[in-house]
Image (tube, grey):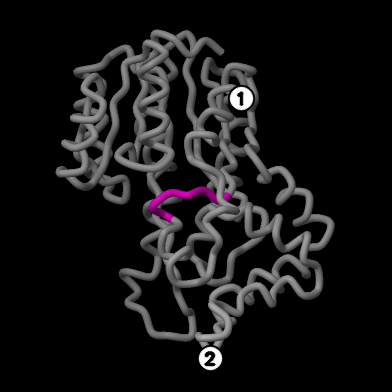
Amino acid sequence: MDLHNNTILITGGTSGFGLEFASRLLALGNTVIITGRNTQKLQETQQQLPAVHTIQSDVSKAEDIVALYDQVTRQFPALNMIINNAGEMRKLSLNQPHELSDITREVEINLMGPIRMVQQFLPHLKTKPKAVILNVTSGIAFMPFPISPIYSASKSGLRAYTQALRVQLIKTSIKVIELVAPGSSTPLNDKFIEEDGFNAKTLMAPEKIVDAAIQGMKNDKDEIYPGLAGLMRVMSRVAPKLMLSQAGKIGRLRCMVRSKVESCWPLAYASNRLITIHYLESFQ
């Protein structure tokens, strides 16, 4: 795949993977448009990357996607690539009450957002000789992370949707790519590092993940597994019950005596330390 002289739309482009994609794809000579909900962050990103184009848009709102389509196709008719990157990850206890209007927020952003984006932009992309849809999923798509149940469901759903989309578009000019991201040191994971004992050293740098993604795109890969994401896929088949059991301990094993031990989460290593380490490194 030629990654030069394309016109690329990236959702969630003000931080994490989205920002790294924007930086690298601009450097390759592409026209890059990013979206985000926060106007101030969009302005800061444009100061950091003067060549980038910014549009305020919320992928969880259907009306924003329609407006985004109208603006982008009018101003950038050469658009031939979409990277569905926008995402949100929350810790939620399903034992606690939640507003029904809020409980599915991650589904609206992480799953319904890409589905609506694709549906809205598909007719335009079909007019291009070569087009790309890249959906960012997660190693968690292979094994749920109990502390983030709705996020887990949204990423599993997005993986299934991406696979089905690829089959349906096989006779078109559109290539469908899935980036299965491992755990990364992005704002998405900050809450887990600060509150649940995650070791930031086990997380893969976002720039390395995006570098792997770009290399995979150049090599015409349909599915890209940076770092230990591929191992997560294997382990979910080899030892699914063990992996789920270990994941369930994260976030609830806390030490009562903070002066002696900072966090009890390493106890989750007890039954199989090596597998658990690899599993922790596969979170996004």
**Residue extending farthest bottom:** 256
Q: Please give the name of the residue rendered at 48% of the width and 40% of the height, measured from the top-left corner.
A: 206
Q: Position of residue 269 (x, y in %)?
A: 73, 71
Per the rendered image, the range of residues in magenta is 183-188
Q: Position of residue 121 (x, y in %)?
A: 36, 28
Task: Please determine whether, in this image, residue 91 is positioned above or below residue 71.
Answer: below
Q: Position of residue 209 (x, y in %)?
A: 54, 36
Q: Which mark is residue 216?
A: 1
In the rendered structure, which amino acid carries the disc numbered 2?
Answer: Met
Task: Please determine whether, in this image, residue 256 is positioned above or below residue 43.
Answer: below
Residue that numbered label 2 is attached to:
256
Residues packed near mark 1 inside 10 Å, few (<14), some (14 to 19) or many (20 plus): some
User: Is disc 1 placed on a helix, strand or loop?
Assistant: helix
Q: Please give the name of the residue rendered at 70% of the width and 60% of the height, measured from the top-left corner.
A: 277
Inspect this view and state whether residue 156 appears. no
Query: Which of 86/282 is in front?
Result: 282
Task: Please determine whether, in this image, residue 130 is positioned above or below residue 107.
Answer: above
In the rendered structure, which amino acid carries the disc numbered 1?
Answer: Gly
Q: Position of residue 149 (x, y in %)?
A: 52, 68
User: Is disc 2 placed on a helix, strand or loop?
Assistant: loop
Q: Nearer the viewer, mark 1 or mark 2?
A: 2
